[in-house]
Image (cartoon, rainbow, N blue to C red):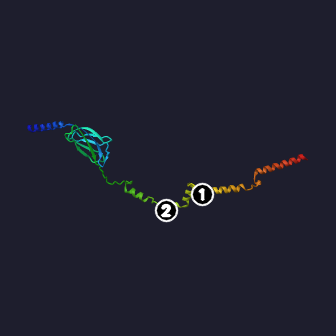
Amino acid sequence: MRKLIGILFLLISFSAFAQKEKPLVQFTGIIYNADSLKTVVPYVSVTNKSYHNAVTVASYNGYFSFVAHEQDTISFTAVGYAPTTVVIPANVNKSYTAQIHLKPQITNLPTFHVFPWATTDEFRKDFVTAKIADDDLEIARKNVSRASIAAISNTLARDGQEIQSANAQQMHTNIVNSHSITNPLLNPLAWGSLIKQIADGDKSKSSGN
């Protein structure tokens, strides 16, 4: 039993020692859309699966750079894209640069219908009291009704023919009025002037006698 425990301890120590012996690597790269190599994918989560699941977030331009180890497994995940895994190769001489391509992933959700009625009774009540929309014939009948035409004529501006007719009528009225003779007996001011002239004439006759 002691020998077995000792062997397990040695294996664990050897594994930890081997892990520590992996050379460090500066892992750098840019993440692109696999369907368009000119389009970068921003803010991608980069996770080192081989080192405590350490997470790094790529920049807006899809750029990332962090320290890892050779043969570490790196996972790239983003909303709307299928996850991608990259293994850093060995003997890369302290730096490794890569272009990561994420494949867009489309998720089709099931159809979901939203109804404004909480119960069938509410639906039945609204259905019975619902106002049926007018058909084309009823709409046309309302549009040509006398009330509808009168309302439209009060709001619409006059066209050129209506303006020309109104101007011609006004000119005709002005011409007729300019040549008409006004009866002075219908003018109150004329009556006052006539009475004054008669009174002045009587005074002059009295003074002459």
In the rendered image, residue 11, in percent from the top left (x then y), is placed at 13, 38
Image position of 122 (left or right of 180): left
Q: Is residue 53 left or right of residue 60?
A: left
Judged from the image, the secondary structure of the residue bearing numbered disc 2 is helix
Give residue 148's position: percent from left, percent from top.
54, 59
The residue positioned farthest toward the right in the image shown: 209
The correct choice, above or below, for 3 with respect to 160 in the image is above
Label 2 sits on residue: 138
Q: Between 154 and 168, which is closer to the camera in this rendering? A: 168
Q: Nearer the viewer, residue 141 or 100?
A: 100
Point 82% across, 49% down: residue = 197
Name the amino acid, label 1.
Answer: Glu
Q: Earlier in the sequence, mark 1 or mark 2?
A: 2
Front of the two marks 1 and 2: 1
Q: Are marks 1 and 2 in contact (CB under 8 Å)?
A: no
Examine the rendered structure and indicate whether residue 10 appears above or below residue 156. Answer: above
| Residue drawn at point x = 8 percent, y = 37 percent | 3
Q: Quadrant of the N terminus?
A: top left
Residue receiving disc 1: 162
